[in-house]
Image (spheres, helix red, strand yellow):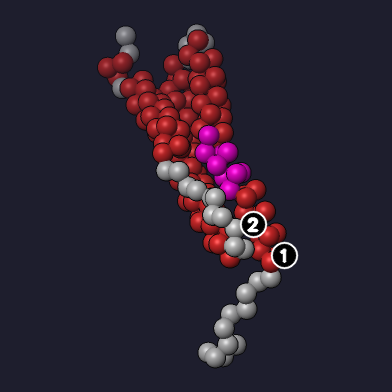
């Protein structure tokens, strides 16, 4: 392609297919923004509660808390990536809606996912601090 040619516009059928795929993808990303944090809570809180009730479970509880905090850090950074992908999908949806001459209905709302970030971040920090506190010699009776 030389500098004189303009880029070829995709035809309407291709744009409609792309619109459908982006719609599905953006919904999947947004669903992850609430499903992953709640799965993290369930996947860590239930086993930790079981470890806390075991007799002589101090070492395993400590390791479980620190391990859960490491998982929490991973989940938090995963959520950051998912948020960026969801936002990009919505922006692409807007562009395709414009190209198709449709009313632009795709919208990115910023604050809907913040409580889930706070949940994961707060729980991760709580797990880490509790695990470190149990490691501390002052915590032993």
Secondary structure found at label 1: helix
Residue nearest the viewer, comparing 113 with 67: 113
Q: Residue at x 54, y 54 (%)?
A: 104
Residue nearest the viewer, comparing 53 with 137: 53
Q: Disc 1 or 2, which lies upstream in sequence?
A: 1
Q: Residue at x 49, y 39 (%)?
A: 75
* Magenta part, dominant SS: helix
So how many labels did they put on this image?
A: 2
Q: Which residues are magenta?
A: 26-34
Secondary structure found at label 2: helix
Toward the left, the furthest residue is 138
Does the segment drawn in magenta span residue 28? yes
Please rate how many residues cluster around mark 1, counting C-alpha atoms within 10 Å: few if below 14, some from 14 to 19, many from 20.
few
- Whole-angstrom CA distance, mark 1 to mark 2, is 10 Å
Q: Residue at x 59, y 62 (%)?
A: 101
Please rate how many residues cluster around mark 2, counting C-alpha atoms within 10 Å: few if below 14, some from 14 to 19, many from 20.
many
Q: Position of residue 63 (x, y in %)?
A: 46, 26
Q: Position of residue 103 (x, y in %)?
A: 56, 55
Q: Position of residue 68 (x, y in %)?
A: 47, 30
Which image quarter is the C terminus in? top left
Residue beneath disc 2? 19
Q: Residue at x 43, y 23 (%)?
A: 62
Residue beneath disc 1? 13
Residue nearest the viewer, comparing 22 with 134: 22
Does the segment drawn in magenta span residue 63? no
């Amino acid at each position: 392609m030389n500098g004189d040619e303009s880029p070829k516009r995709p035809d309407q059928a291709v744009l409609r297919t792309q619109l459908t795929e982006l719609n599905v993808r953006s919904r999947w990303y947004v669903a992850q923004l609430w499903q992953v944090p709640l799965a993290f809570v369930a996947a860590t809180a239930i086993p930790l509660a079981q470890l806390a009730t075991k007799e002589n479970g101090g070492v395993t509880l400590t390791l479980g808390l620190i391990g859960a905090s490491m998982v929490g850090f991973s989940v938090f950074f995963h959520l950051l990536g998912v948020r960026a992908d969801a936002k990009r999908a919505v922006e692409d949806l807007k562009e395709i809606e414009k190209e198709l001459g449709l009313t632009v209905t795709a919208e990115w709302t910023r604050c809907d996912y913040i409580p889930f970030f706070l949940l994961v971040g707060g729980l991760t920090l709580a797990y880490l601090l509790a695990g470190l506190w149990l490691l501390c010699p002052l915590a032993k009776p």
